Image: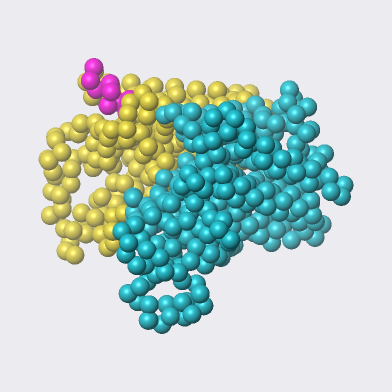
Amino acid sequence: MNLAQIIQYCLSGITVGSIYAIVAIGFNIIYNTTGIINFAQGEFLIVGAMMAVSLTKVVPLPVAIGLAVVITTVLGGLVEVVFIRRVRDASVLRLIVITIGVSILIREAMLHIWDEKVRSLPYFTGTDVSTISVMGAHMSPQVLWVLGVSAVIVTGLTLFFRFTLIGRAMRACADDRMAARLCGINDRWMVTLSFMLSAGIGAIAGCVISPVTQTQYDMGAPLAIKGFTVAILGGLGNSIAAIAAGLILGLLEVLMMSQFQAAYKEAVSIVVLLLILVFRPSGLFARRDVSSLRAF
Amino acid sequence: MGGRRYIPLIAAALLIVAGQPVLWAIGRPYYMTQITMSAYYALVVIGLCLLMGYAGQVSLGHAGFFAVGGYTSAVLTTCNLLARQNEFPIRWFRWLGLLVERQDLYGQAMLCFSPWAAFVVAMLLAGLIGFSIGLPVIRLKGHYLAMATLGFGLIIYRIVQGAPVFGQADGISNVPPFELFAGLEVNGRPPYRVQNYYIAWVAVLAAMLLAINLVQSRVGRALRSIHQNEEAAHSLGVNTFQYKLSTFVLSAVFAAVGGALLTHYNGSIGPSEVTVMKSVRYVSIVAVGGMANLWGALVMGIVLNFLSLRGVFGTYDDAVFGVILIVIMLFAPQGLLRMPTLRGISTLFSRRSYG
């Protein structure tokens, strides 16, 4: 393997890794405010991309993506209001099962609204053959889009949670919901907002990767599994660690793909998931202070 | 108490026997085929009900155990060892009577494992895999357990789809019938329909008998105490880990029995049996049956699988199970049979009879 090849592999590992990280952050946002894992997280990406693909037929690409993100955000809010809000003080098992049911419903709805065909958005800049050379390695300009958008999302979220009133209110809810409520924070609205937020960033991620990985109605579940693996790897609820974990998993996957059959690529993340669950369920970067896990 | 716990079993047996002439009378004897298949799926559901309802542990990977049973049986009874019959382990297997000679569809001579040997291997393998997966995984709780079992199911799915020995996307076909004893065989062809209807039900009722007795026993009480409050159970000296693990293994073996028998009955098995959606389907059946309600799980397992196999749900097959999950969890977490309006009916089935 020469240098150009290594760079090539690293680039594609970082690209998929950053998408996994965004899915993981989606998990984390909801986990932090509600303590549940939203199994429908992967579906948000696919809904966003599907919506954008359909909208590009009537409006220009940026508008289509914007609309798709807004619609998916609203969908995320609806999921919370219709399904999650009703059950309070329910067991985790019950809530998990509900989100599994929601993910099936969204998936089946997509199958009936669209169909089982593979679609994709057009490349944001250039075409599928245009490449940029980096030290002998070739990459699509879309890779830059993926990396750029991921960086913007992460920075945006960090700023949002640090400096805006709503962001701080959400953090307060994550920390201690009862105390937050006593301070006059509308905690229910914060939960709804967390679903909207993760649906929204999910939709953005879905649109950005669509040109590279294509989009099909049933691609949500594998993405969710990888996102969850990353979230666990980084420590559930810890979004900064999730980015590092995402890159690790992405690079690991690419490494396996370069050595073994592509069919077993999926197995890598699941093996990682099982290993981490068994040996270090609090994540690679867990500090002794457990409460730090629940910070954004 | 005494024999009262067996009353529902006897009632069920009578109902099953009565079912046969009824199906003939309404001119739909072929329904028996789907009922037989549903009964094998119900075996998975009964095992999962013990795990989810009584031990309180969720598993999103039971289709994986079903596949372990089905694929092990299928591979061992269809691989041709004739060319290597004089090599080391094969000779010994033959001497032990584990192999049978038969002819395939085209009249070619084949030397394969006998279905009985394959069945036993499948059970042992499922138990072993259940044990080695359960050992680390059962310590996990909530989402972690759900995701870990989901991951296990996905790995089995990938292996089955990727490995040539499992036929990849095509699966394995031409699995021979399973001759149990004295001319009774698990065989999907129409002349064997009535016979198989009863074979499947005997398997299901035997599983129910085992499950009911288990739930009634010291083990069952320990499991329920774990479900209600694990710490309290632990502090009272219940070895919670061991109980949870053995229930996990037991439910894995139940699933494998269902998988192996159904594979012989259908004559084939494919990756579609191993999807996550299948695992979720088993979970939703246990949920709609009322979690800790073996009879509820059995009734729902038969009814829903029967309707699904008859194609009643059409293209909404998976969506139906998604809706069931949501509706039951939102409005009737105690299951359909425990809803207030149905309480009268539920007393026939639950609590009093084996509580």
Q: Which residue is drawn at 55% across and 23% down?
A: A81
**Relative to the observer, which residue lies in front, A186 or A87?**
A87
For the point 44% across and 63% down, which residue is it? B77
Q: Is residue A166 visible?
A: no
Q: Chain B is drawn in which colour?
A: cyan
Whole-percent x, y for residue B354 in the image: 80, 44
Q: Is residue A52 magenta?
A: yes
Residue in front for this viewpoint, B7 or A132: B7
- Residue at 34 percent across and 67 percent down: it is B109
Where residue A11 appears, as percent x and y from the top left, is 24, 51
Pick the residue in front: B233 or B271.
B271
- Residue furthest toward the top? A58
The span shown in magenta is A50-58
Colour used to depict chain A in the structure image: yellow
Instruction: Residue B38: give x, y in percent of width and height.
Output: 55, 41
- Residue A279 appears at what percent x and percent y? 53, 61
